[in-house]
Amino acid sequence: MAQFRCKQFLVEQKHCGMKVSTDSLILGSWSNASCLPAGRVLDIGAGTGILSLMLAQKTADNVEIHAVEIEKNAILDCQKNFYQSKWSQRLRLLHTDIKALATDNKYQWIISNPPYYTAGQKFETQRMLARHQQELTFQQLLTCVSALITQQGSAEFILPYANLDCFVKEASKLELHLVARLNVKTVEDKNEYKLACLRFSKNKTEYSQDELVIYQQNKQYTKAYKALCQPYYLNF
């Protein structure tokens, strides 16, 4: 699908190796960035720019959003998506490696749907760049986040549930404290979780944990999933 249409914006994805996914739609919908009255947001590994656009929709007009992307084909789509959106003046695309980004100007909010496939899995090149830990390991990602976030800031991620413990342990080494977590099941009659949304802060605050089920047993979307994604999905 060359396009993905949300209620307030259109995502072109003709060139990008990683198309719009349920992962990003859940993370962007769950994000608490709407509480940010002003400041700067950083989207690491922006791809098509879907997360930046979702956060632009839910944040105040004086919140600036920077999106970092390294893959040249993703840049083509992301640039177009930002330009044609009604928040183009607040969206800035940076074609660079996150590890090379200057740390002197901090961000109040960071969001990322990070790479999570391990060595040995084979995909076409663009998709592999977007999803392969050899390009950006969890440790490297979290080190960058720790250096780029303000003391009062928050950082949000979505990961396969199997990677959860490893990611949280790496974050704790950098004094990034887990303050909120959303465990995601695909179908309500399944026992195992597939994904987890995580929110970290440099300050320890009260911890909260919730559960989201995407589908009912009849393969229809659950009420909770519809309520979460309603601001974005056309059919909700």
Image (cartoon, rainbow, N blue to C red):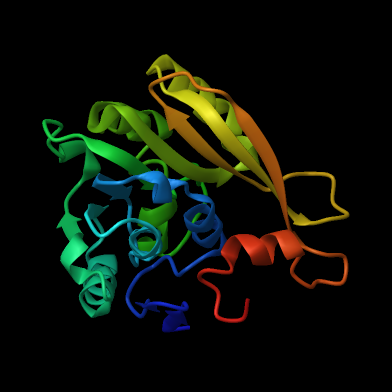
From what the image shows, is residue 2 above or below residue 78? below
- Residue 114 can be seen, yes or no: no
Which of these two is toward me, 184 or 129?
A: 184
In percent of the image, x 16 and y 56: which residue is there?
Answer: 95
- Residue at image point 84% right, 51% down: 190
Where in the figure is residue 211, as x and y percent of width and height?
71, 45
- Residue positioned 31% across, 27% down in the render: 146
- Residue 108 is drawn in which quadrant? top left
Residue 11 showing in the rendered view: yes
Q: Is residue 186 above or below residue 101?
A: below
Locate the C terminus by quadrant.
Answer: bottom right
Query: Is residue 235 placed above or below 168 in the rendered structure?
Result: below
Residue 8 is situated, as x and y percent measured from the top left of the image, at: 41, 77
Residue 92 in the figure: left or right of residue 205: left
Horizontal side, residue 86 vs residue 208: left or right? left
Tell me what residue is drawn at x 29 percent, y 67 percent: 74
